[in-house]
Image (cartoon, rainbow, N blue to C red):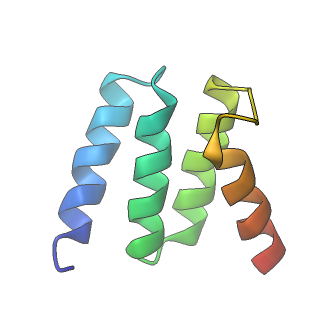
Amino acid sequence: MNRVPEAVDILAFNAKINPSFYLNHNLLAKAQLQAGDKKAAIKSYQLSTQKFTDNADNEAFKALEELEAIK
């Protein structure tokens, strides 16, 4: 659990290197949520939905709905 900030850094790097792979953004958002950074997680999920627009296959659409409901 103490390695969440390290995971966020690694996943942010992966998303920067391969921005077209939406899963990088989804994993980054999950790590950001675990690190307590909800605002950054929402932004990562939003990037994922822009890159991969099929809401049947992209879990980011559901995650965004849940995060928006918590506001």
Residue 15 appears in view: yes
Q: Quadrant of residue 48?
A: top right
| Residue 19 percent across, percent down from the top left | 44, 25
Is 37 left or right of 38, judged from the image as shown? left
Q: Quadrant of residue 50?
A: top right
Tell me which residue sits at (48%, 70%) in the image: 33
Tell me which residue sits at (75%, 35%) in the image: 56
The quadrant in which the N terminus is found is bottom left
Is 41 left or right of 59, judged from the image as shown? left
Task: Reply above or below: 11 against 70.
Answer: above
Q: Which of the pair 49/55 is nearer the observer?
A: 55
Mark count: 0
Tell me which residue sits at (25%, 52%) in the image: 9
Residue 71 appears in view: no
Is 10 left or right of 38, judged from the image as shown? left
| Residue 71 percent across, percent down from the top left | 79, 78
Residue with the most extreme front position: 56
Residue with the most extreme right position: 69
Tell me which residue sits at (46%, 36%) in the image: 23
Task: Reply above or below: 50 against 9.
Answer: above
Task: Reply above or below: 66 against 22.
Answer: below
